[in-house]
Amino acid sequence: MKKFKTIFVGENEVGKTTLLITYDLKYLPEKYLPTAYDDFSKIYKIEENKEIEIEFWDKGMSENNDNFTRFIYDQTDVIAICFAIDNRSSFQNIESFWILEIEHYSPNSKIILIGTKIDLRNNEERINELKEENQKLITKEEGMDLAKKIKAIKYFECSSLNQKGIETIFNEIMLICIGKYDGINQEKQKKKGCILN
């Protein structure tokens, strides 16, 4: 069975760990959520008699030891860079930190960009908090523009709270891994009928 590796990177508390937990468990735990999640893998059936395995890794900013960082990025096929739409610092650090790190440790990996916590677009309390700080939520257009700038294959948005957009992200990762994602004709690829086991 062919194996692939995807790592999720981003600042702490942007929701990447929650995203991984929600996808793995198929629900969002109400109790304590860890700051990092154990690596796990999923099997995908891509044809009648063909399956692939994808490992998912969780990396935070605190893991900055060179040897460990090199180990994390080793043989990575896809890198998912995450930011929270209510945290502009996490958005700005993609260019100032994450892309530089990726170019150094894993320049040949495919990149996708993910904006998390999109449920906050309907949260007046959080919107008002940001206004008091002369800040505002990051828009979908800003995310798409950044994705083009960093040459990401695609920009995604999701909410672990509402479980919105999560399956789409991981199904697209699968398509990237098996080389069926052309970055242009997305709808054609989605109709190929790949099945998650």
Image: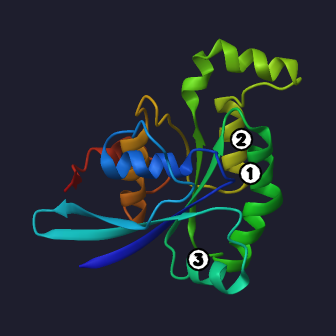
Q: Seen from this angle, which residue lies furthest bottom?
A: 67
Which element carries disc 1, helix, strand or loop?
Answer: helix
Mark drawn on residue 28: none
Which element carries disc 2, helix, strand or loop?
Answer: helix
> Taking 101 as reference, is 88 above or below it?
above
Label 1 is placed on what type of residue? Answer: Lys
Mark 1 or mark 3: which is in front?
Answer: 3
Judging depth in this view, the residue of 190 and 163 nearest the camera is: 163
Question: Which mark sits nearer the N-terminus, 1 or 3?
Answer: 3
Label 1 to label 3, Cα distance in Å?
Answer: 22 Å
Label 2 is placed on what type of residue? Answer: Asp
In which quadrant of the rendered view does residue 89 lie?
top right
Mark 2 or mark 3: which is in front?
Answer: 3
In which quadrant of the rendered view does residue 68 lie?
bottom right
Which element carries disc 3, helix, strand or loop?
Answer: helix
Quadrant of the drawing holding the N terminus: bottom left
Q: Position of residue 187 (x, y in %)?
A: 37, 41
Q: Position of residue 3 (x, y in %)?
A: 33, 77
Label 3 is placed on what type of residue? Answer: Tyr
Residues at marks 1 and 3 touching, judged by CB atoms closer than 8 Å: no
Residue that numbered label 1 is attached to: 149
